[in-house]
Amino acid sequence: MILTDINTFSSKFEEKIKGNMIHLVSHFDTDGITSAAIMSTILKRLDAQFSLKILKSLSKEDIQDFPKDKILILLDLGSSHIEELSSLNNQVFVIDHHEIKDTTDTTKINIINPHLSKEYENLCSAELCYLIGRKISSENQDLSHLAIIGMVGDTMEKHINKTRDKIIKDANVKVKKGLLIYPSTRPLDKALEFSSKPYIPGVTGDPKGVYEMLREAGIEKIGKTFKALIDLTDQEMKNLVTSVMLRLSSDNKEKEYLGNLFLVKFFNKIEDAREVSAMINACSRMDHPGIALAFCLGSATAKKRAERIYVKYRQHIISGLKHINKNKKIKGREYIIINAQDKIKDTIIGTMASILSFSSIYKEGTIIIAMAYNDDKIKVSSRMAGRNPKSPRNLKELMESVAQTLGGESGGHKHAAGCMIKKEHENEFIKLVKKKLDVEIVKV
């Protein structure tokens, strides 16, 4: 079981870091940032001295640049680079949940990864960090809300396993069933206007469309503002669900867009965990991971800055969706390739792919490949459409295969993966992906 593995890992972790300098490395998404916030707090409470670096992705060059005289702790990354990490003379700890090759030799490093556990439990890196902290000291229970935010950030909220349920109870989180539009704690008109998961045709990005739908649902302003989603009556919620579903085209749409809302206490207010997660993610995607981390650690100044960044980020998202909608895409059987080039930030292209995968624009199982320039490289994000796609195709293997052919690097999961290639291989990449997907479709 994962908790047995956590206990073993935690004991060795606490023993090895005593009196040593530590270099903490974490991914820049919500799970990575919350993992970094949890782990940095744990280390401070242990009086450990450490440096911290947040990365968009982990490359071989990054590993070569790691300090040679410090213990390395990698959070939410590392599983795709076990061989390189094993060759270092450093003591290495990896806390990650990404898929790992069955043939990988992990004996030379210390790793906790649910995929290596005898009984797999779907946990994110922030949850793993929290469980380690909780094992080290009960004082760290106050970090449990960050684990929940990280979990929601990695869209794992549909599956509440035994271990996750314990974390939810530790965090005293209120779980409420409802329409998966966020923030559920803010005025409904604004939540709908900026809704990207789901993307609602004729409503997202269109204030007139929002008012028309709310009028149709019989939801009116109270004074000068609309109610928040969590404050709707049962009848108002039913009416709203009907109005939203009429605008979506997915077969199992009601099941897809109704689910758990996690309400956490953050800055002494009850907040929608998805909204907090989105703010953290926005800061990193807009090149401010330091603000995201400070926000998680409770800085009021960082909170104000994060709120401003989030407004700009949502504007970028709406603009990006409009660009994708208007511009030419490469369409194949059960796949689509979107080459945004320099029109969408490389830090946002993955979010675009995710939004489209949940949007019901494409049928379940459709592969979405989204590309954007990153200096002299191209960031590629791939997603499989649908909330629980049952396609036998594996995006991690697809990205790995193409990236290796072109000398790039890759990582991810079966239904969500990515890679980084040189810009000079742009056309070759598209040809290779089309060829591989066309062959796979024939096989399937």
Image (spheres, grey):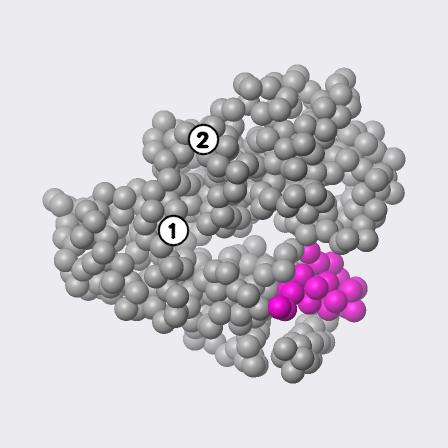
Look at label 2 and name its amino acid. Lys
The answer, for residue 338, to whether it is visible in the render is: no
Q: Residue at x 72, y 29 (%)?
A: 8
**Residue 323: x percent and y percent?**
45, 69
Q: Secondary structure at mark 1?
A: strand
User: Residue 325's mark?
Assistant: none
User: Residue 259's mark?
Assistant: 1
Q: Residues within 10 Å of mark 1 (few under 14, many from 20)?
A: some
Q: Is residue 418 above or below residue 393?
A: above
| Front residue of this view, candidates 397 and 6 | 6
Look at label 1 and name its amino acid. Gly
| Front residue of this view, candidates 7 and 423 | 7
The answer, for residue 356, to whether it is visible in the render is: yes
Please identify the quarter of the rendering in which residue 45 is found.
top right
**Residue 421: x percent and y percent?**
71, 64
Which residues, given as a range, are shown in magenta?
392-411
Q: If the image is split into quadrants, where does the C terminus sit?
A: bottom right
User: Residue 169's mark?
Assistant: 2
Horizontal arrangement in the rendering, residue 421 relative to residue 307 (left or right): right
Q: Is residue 235 above or below residue 383?
A: above
